Image (cartoon, rainbow, N blue to C red):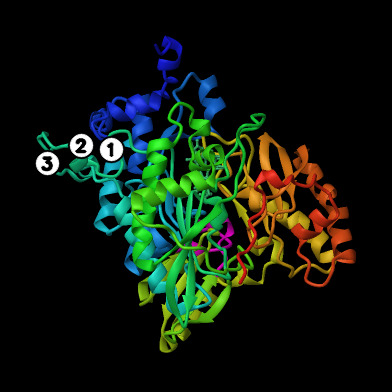
Amino acid sequence: MVSKKTEESPKLHKNEGLKADSNYLRGTIAEGLADTLSGAISADDTQLLKFHGSYQQDDRDERSERRKKKLDKAYSFMIRIRVPGGVATPAQWLKMDELSDRYANGTIKLTTRQAFQFHGVIKGVLKKTVQEINAAALDTIAACGDVNRNVMCNPNPHASEVHAEVLKLSQDISDHLTPKTRAYHEIWLDEEKISGGEEEAEIEPIYGKTYLPRKFKIVVAVPPSNDVDIYAHDLGFIAVVQKGKVVGYNVTVGGGMGMTHGQEATHPRLAEVLGFCKPEQAVEVAEKVVLVQRDFGDRTNRAHARLKYTIKDRGLDWFRKEVESRLGYKLLKAKPFKFDSTGDRYGWVKGADGKWHLTLYIQNGRVKDTPEFQMKTGLREIALLHKGDFRLTCNQNLIIGGIADKDRKDIEKLLKHYGLDRGLSSSGLRLNSMACVALPTCGLSLAESERYLPDLVTELEEVVESCGLRDDAIVIRMTGCPNGCARPYLGEIAFVGKAPGKYNMYLGAGFDGARLNRLFKASVKAEDIKEELRPLIEQYAKERKEGERFGDFCMRKKWVKPFEESENYHVPAVDN
Ligand code: SRM
Ligand code: SF4
């Protein structure tokens, strides 16, 4: 007889019950939006709202003042807008520009995953905003929540002729894995309610009632650029290009960044190479990988629920078998590939079709106007005459893409007038910097990030310039907490918020994004960072070998504890 103890399975996390009882993500969101007495929605609906692409937040700058005055928090909503592959039309850019002024805080945030975000949208206009986003043929469903999120791809590959192919794959995967529930259309777009009676398999064929155990992220990379940071993602496809055509994809699985301070069981992990598939198999492979995670991911502990832990616990071979048994065929052996960097290709580049692409530096992805720099206005003026596209990069930057020779002059005039390309002459450190949103909107932030990194880089520029390294690309990343939204564990230098004004300092990631960094010093005070880094940068300038990257130098000097082989800290390139 099986004892009672072994019969009992561990208790599911409460969010699992919430999803199961939500009637496919409806909950009482519609009722909550209609309630005009409060600027907030219920705690349960706050969780479900994420699947619809929005987070309830409050202005943390105002919290203590309001508490003193016994006022409720200053609630507002963040809206994340999916842009699969990061490509938007000029008309869509103009719509984002307009909506950010009309309903949000006047800024557009270009995220680390090629999406748009609005902050500060109040409940009363949330539905209207989502409706207008959809009217511009963009959407917010599955931008957040326990589902597949925005699918990224390289927006400006060196082999530019393959962009259309990888973009199409990211859009196809995105469409295939978008939740099929009509809840989104009913709540936000006033579609008539479905009377019921459908089978679960019809309503949500891939996810079922409880969706995934946790968020899920997919990217498509085109070597040698690793701008998508493929090893940070649950699932990745590495394009294998021959004679200007994609002949298949190496598949990677099990990457993720998030961890919690003081909880060793949580950690960043790099994805591993699973095998190779043909282009026409890629969407199916994505589906089967998602299904294995749906069925085996840990639904009892959200801190252990990402695919990286499923694979770490059960092994890559087990995972491959599960995927292949669902596919009904075996994946092939991975083909050779090599990445060289995670950064963006700045400036003008001519594509194979003869059109120009201009990558602009957008500090931390925040598009806004200030009295000194009318960036948002300038980009609006460009959108009004631009006939190509706008491409969001995976590093929070922006590409004005597909400019014909004859139109380049007009764009250049606007660039000059508004100083939009001024940022391109920034230091190598700044051009390779990335910070997450953090304060004042992010509810999880422990320290400043987006509002602090630019000033820190200014301080550090004095050091790199004095060492003759002004134009050297060094990847520096900052996040306000260990969740890792700017992929800090892949920065050659990184700062992870510990407490107000204090950061854990990491060093030594690979410039190609294939090696994690390591903790150098905990709880460094913001005012001490420059002097912590000065001797390291000075020594690098003096002693580096030809072409040696800062991260590699940190590892060679053993400034951080060397990794154990078992730590899955480095993904070797697959060679011939
Ligand atoms: Fe993130 C949560 C912002 C990319 C790992 N992330 C959040 C929330 C929603 C905070 C919350 O849960 O209350 C942040 C909203 C802040 C705000 O006010 O806007 C937030 N994450 C962002 C963005 C906007 C950062 C940015 O400055 O660009 C990025 C939006 C991406 C998008 O368009 O979809 C963003 N987040 C990432 C990435 C990078 C990536 O995916 O390439 C990661 C690390 C990769 C990964 O997932 O492992 C990331 N975010 C997290 C986590 C930790 C997940 C984990 O496995 O532990 C959280 C917290 C959570 O899920 O519990 C989180
Ligand atoms: Fe917020 Fe932390 Fe993500 Fe930064 S890393 S946006 S502080 S959750």
Residue identified by numbered label 1:
208
Residue identified by numbered label 3:
192
Q: With 338 as the anchor, is 114 left or right in this view?
A: left
Q: Secondary structure at mark 2?
A: helix
Relative to 248, say whether 437 is above or below.
Answer: above
Ligand 2 sits in which quadrant?
top right
**Residue drawn at point x = 38 percent, y = 71 percent:** 165
Frontmost residue, 135 versus 200? 200
Q: With 188 as the anchor, is 174 left or right in this view?
A: right
Relative to 22, say whether 481 is above or below.
Answer: below
- Where does residue 424 sit, x and y in percent of width and height? 62, 71
Q: Secondary structure at mark 1?
A: loop
Frontmost residue, 110 versus 232? 232
Residue 208 in the magenta stretch? The answer is no
Relative to 23, say whether 359 is above or below.
Answer: below
| Amino acid, disc 1 | Gly
Name of the residue lying farthest toward the front: 1
Magenta region, residue range:
360-376
Q: With 511 as the anchor, is 145 left or right in this view?
A: left
Q: Label for residue 200?
A: 2
Q: Earlier in the sequence, mark 1 or mark 2?
A: 2
Quadrant, the C terminus: bottom right
Q: Is residue 101 visible?
A: no
